[in-house]
């Protein structure tokens, strides 16, 4: 019984998150005024890193973004993600592996550029 309730609640949460994501405007960079207020090189590097990670995650396909969000932002286990998405746990692991590989490639390209 608990498993069904868990799955049902996370399915609703997942759908609501997807609705919010769909409804969001595209990400806009910080204005020069805001960046100028935080003028240290470390802070600027952190901002650029955050932008790079956000761009890399948003460039992933829907299936990859979904498992990354549920695993790393919601903190769900592989099994919980599998139940939530209605897919086998092996598929979750496979998608996470592929998504992480793509993120690593995107972020290593960013690191070379900076």
Image: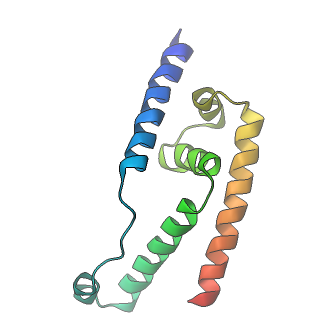
In the image shown, does 24 or 55 lie closer to the viewer? 24
Q: In the rendered view, how is the structure colored? A: rainbow
Position above or below: 37 against 64 = below
Count numbered badges in the picture: 0
Q: Quadrant of residue 9?
A: top left
The residue positioned 49% from the left and 66% from the top of the image is 54
The residue positioned 64% from the left and 72% from the top of the image is 106
Q: Quadrant of residue 46?
A: bottom left
The C terminus: image quadrant: bottom right
The residue positioned 59% from the left and 49% from the top of the image is 62
Position above or below: 69 against 104 = above
Q: x and y percent of residue 49 in the render?
A: 48, 76
Using residue 75 as the reference point, say whether residue 101 is left or right of it: right
The residue positioned 36% from the left and 71% from the top of the image is 28
Using residue 87 as the reference point, say whether residue 12 is left or right of it: left
Q: Quadrant of residue 19?
A: top left
Q: x and y percent of residue 79 in the render?
A: 65, 31
Q: x and y percent of residue 87 in the render?
A: 69, 30
Position above or below: 30 against 6 = below
* Residue at the top extreme of this rendering: 1
């Amino acid at each position: 019984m608990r498993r069904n309730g868990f799955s049902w609640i996370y399915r609703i949460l997942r759908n609501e998150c997807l609705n919010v994501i769909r409804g969001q405007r595209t990400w806009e960079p910080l204005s020069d005024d805001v960046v100028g207020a935080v003028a240290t090189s470390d802070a600027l590097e952190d901002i650029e890193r955050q932008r790079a990670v956000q761009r890399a995650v948003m460039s992933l396909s829907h299936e990859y973004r979904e498992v990354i969000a549920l695993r790393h932002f919601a903190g769900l286990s592989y099994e919980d993600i599998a139940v939530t998405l209605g897919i086998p746990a092996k598929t979750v692991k496979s998608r996470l592996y592929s998504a992480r590989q793509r993120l690593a490639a995107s972020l290593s390209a960013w690191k070379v550029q900076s």
